[in-house]
Image (cartoon, rainbow, N blue to C red):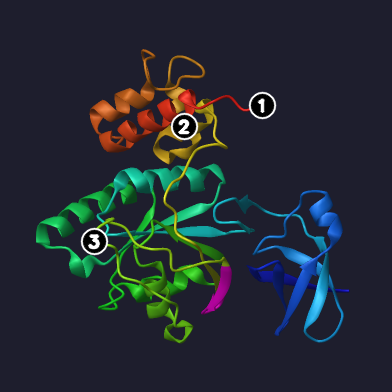
Amino acid sequence: MAEGKIIKALSGFYYVKSNDTIFQCRGRGVFRKNNITPLVGDNVVFTAENDREGYIMEIKERENELVRPPIANVDQAILIFSAKDPEFSPHLLDRFLVIIESYQIKPIIVITKIDLANSDELLNIKQYAKAYEKIGYDVLLTSSKNEIGLEDIYPLLENKITVFAGQSGVGKSSLLNALQPELNLETKAISKHLGRGKHTTRHVELLEIGNGLVADTPGFSSLDFSNIEAEELTYCYPEMKERFANCKFRGCLHDKEPHCAIKEAVETGEIEEFRYNHYLLFLKEIQQRKPRY
């Protein structure tokens, strides 16, 4: 039997790359019986019936796995947000960051379409970028059209599995095309009526860019915190995680409790107020969701 990595899943087939050959494989029936789904990014053991087809026999232990997009063994996530069309949304970005942090995957923020922003809008974007950099996040400002900032992305991809994710219409496929023109991925203009883009990516696939593998993933219209409990939310905010031990009360949720180190840090400007406000919104959302049985 041979070993390889699933680089694409489509219509019940799993495309496994082993050395320089790609095999079209099906999963064993026991996977379905045990409710196990092979994922893009999985390292697998497979049998080759010939030089192009085979069956996946075993899935190696995963480092991590995401549900949306369905992918495993991710090293980092590049979160793509646009400066304009659609408008930059710190609230949505923080939702993405919380989700990625909950899986202990390193996030990198890339803001695209800066060529569309006027001087005031660009100044506002740069202020947000500075706030996220203060927390410790890498933030890149780019333009696929004008090829601005692309050279800073290539080194980040070296020898890693990177998931590209973000709101629909922000230019994920355009950015990938700019990084590697021969990909020729389909792109569509944003809908002026809906204020968002159409999904141009229909499946998850690992693409070779430089010496790394990049997953172009279907866009998202919503994200929830189904895998995060209220007391875990603090750990998804790096600037809160490093301070919450100083809260007076154990299990402090940084909401109504007195002598809270997080609220004090917000008052002194050490923690950005917009980040804290989003935290409170997310906390309320988690607390109000229906119990899981």
Amino acid type, label 2: Thr
Label 3, on which residue?
192
Q: Amino acid at mark 3?
A: Lys
Asked whether residue 270 is in view, the answer is: yes
Q: Residue furthest left?
A: 119
Tell whether 80 sits left or right of 288.
Answer: left
145, above or below 36, in the image: below
Residue 51 occupies quadrant? bottom right
Residue 88, placed above or below residue 189: above
Q: Position of residue 35 (x, y in %)?
A: 77, 49
Q: Are marks 2 and 3 in contact (CB under 8 Å)?
A: no
Inter-mark Cα distance, 2 to 3: 37 Å
- The region drawn magenta spans 205-211
* SS under mark 1: loop
Is residue 159 visible to the viewer in this orientation of the structure? no
The disc, 2 or 3, on the residue closer to the chain's N-terminal end is 3
Q: Amino acid at mark 1?
A: Tyr
Q: What secondary structure is the stretch in magenta mostly built from?
A: strand
Q: Residue at x 48, y 68 (%)?
A: 201
Provide the residue designation for mark 2: 234
Q: Mark 2 or 1 closer to N-term?
A: 2
Q: For the residue carrying disc 1, how many other residues have a C-alpha within 10 Å: few (<14), some (14-19), or many (20+)?
A: few
Label drawn at residue 293: 1
Q: Nearer the viewer, residue 197 or 102?
A: 197
- SS category of the residue bearing label 2: helix
Residue pictured at 49% horizontal, 44% vertical: 99
Question: Which quarter of the image is occupied by the C terminus?
Answer: top right
